[in-house]
Image (spheres, helix red, strand yellow):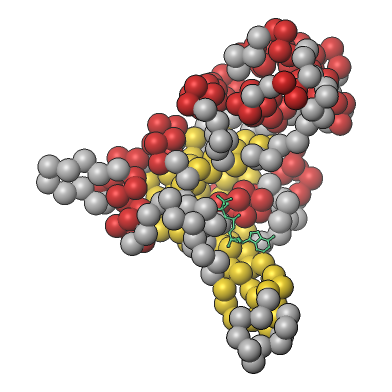
């Protein structure tokens, strides 16, 4: 895969946050500024129509990477290109090519999915009649009953709300859809429905999907290829079978958890501590 044929090309991306911290040692000034390395040196390439997973524990840098790709954060170093366009220098073009769904998607809870999505459609400058038709089609495809489309969202389960968030992101027909922990907190049934829809996105809408997760089963079920991220570094990348082959031993079928453990010495479920590189007073 060359830069020209990539849907997404991330090269040597680094992102460091500065954060005020309390005093750790008596000799430190009361308020020190710590540097937290969220992404150390991340490179990856995603092909068009691929479902690509970024698998890592809490705090490993997944959301930071998604935010950098979606132009919400500017990397400190490195480049990110979406279908050949630089996310920093060609931000406007990139914004037209992507959309992002995060766990904290917000809605007007007193309004219905239709009203919320029509609000989004107006913001995007879409034709109202066409948008209305598409909203009904997409939400029905996602398993929402007709009447739920017109009922206030406050009565909806989190799973349903997550589907509405995905439907809203699809309004702009993104060529690259970024799903940040799309099924976190969902019950098993809603999880399966959202996962089934991810396949449809690729098959029906020809969307390239990059998703983050800390659920190895989800990564394995959904993704063509997976990057395992640990403390801001990609430690392995490949198809689920390729990753498992890294640690396969006689008579034992490894899981992605085994792969993560073998590569990092830690469990996927462990929250990662911040990687702090010195502080400035
Ligand atoms: N705005 C910020 N200011 C300071 N530190 C931050 C900020 N955003 C993220 N971090 C830190 O960067 C590191 C990576 O965080 P990030 O949210 O990208 O991880 P994650 O893998 O998405 O975790 P989670 O699954 O919990 O969302 C963490 O140590 C986090 O505390």
Do we see residue 155 in this rendering?
A: yes
Percent of width and height locating residue 76:
66, 67
Percent of width and height locating residue 146:
70, 7
- Camera-side residue: 251 or 12? 251
Quadrant of the drawing holding the C terminus = bottom right
- Camera-side residue: 231 or 171? 231
**Above or below 206: residue 215:** below
Give the quadrant of ligand 1.
Answer: bottom right
Quarter of the view holding residue 34: bottom right
Percent of width and height locating residue 232:
52, 61
Quarter of the view holding residue 38: bottom right
Q: Residue furthest front?
A: 26
- Camera-side residue: 256 or 41? 256
Percent of width and height locating residue 250:
12, 46
Q: Residue furthest left?
A: 250
Q: Residue furthest bottom?
A: 27
Residue appearing at x 65%, y 40% in the figure: 102
Position of 199 with respect to 253 (left or right) is right
Position of 226 with respect to 163 (left or right) is left
**Above or below 168: residue 139:** above
Residue appearing at x 78%, y 19% in the figure: 152
Position of 211 with respect to 107 (left or right) is left
Do we see residue 209 in this rendering?
A: no
How many marks are shown on the rendered structure?
0
Residue appearing at x 49%, y 22% in the figure: 189
Residue appearing at x 29%, y 57% in the figure: 262
């Amino acid at each position: 895969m060359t830069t020209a044929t990539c849907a997404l090309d991330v090269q040597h991306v680094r992102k460091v946050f500065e954060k005020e911290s309390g005093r750790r040692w008596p000799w430190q000034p009361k308020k020190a500024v710590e540097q937290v390395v969220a992404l150390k040196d991340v490179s990856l390439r995603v092909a068009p129509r691929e479902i690509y997973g970024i698998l890592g524990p809490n705090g490993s840098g997944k959301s930071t990477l998604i935010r950098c790709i979606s132009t919400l954060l500017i990397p400190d170093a490195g480049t990110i290109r979406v279908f050949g366009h630089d996310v920093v220098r060609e931000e406007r073009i990139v914004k037209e090519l992507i959309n992002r769904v995060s766990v904290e998607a917000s809605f007007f809870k007193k309004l219905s999915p239709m009203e919320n999505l029509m609000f989004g459609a107006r913001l995007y400058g879409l034709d109202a009649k066409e948008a209305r038709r598409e909203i009904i089609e997409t939400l029905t495809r996602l398993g929402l009953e007709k009447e739920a489309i017109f009922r206030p969202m406050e009565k909806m389960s989190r799973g349903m709300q997550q589907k509405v968030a995905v439907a809203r992101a699809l309004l702009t027909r993104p060529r690259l859809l970024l799903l940040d922990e799309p099924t976190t907190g969902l019950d098993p049934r809603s999880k399966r429905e959202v996962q089934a829809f991810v396949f449809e996105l690729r098959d029906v809408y020809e969307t390239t999907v990059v998703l983050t997760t800390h659920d190895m089963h989800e990564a394995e079920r959904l993704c063509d290829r997976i990057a395992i991220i640990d403390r801001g570094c990609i430690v392995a990348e490949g198809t689920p079978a390729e990753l498992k082959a890294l640690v396969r031993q006689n008579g034992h079928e490894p899981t992605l958890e085994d792969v993560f453990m073998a590569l990092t010495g830690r469990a996927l479920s462990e929250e990662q501590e911040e990687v702090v590189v010195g502080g400035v007073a």
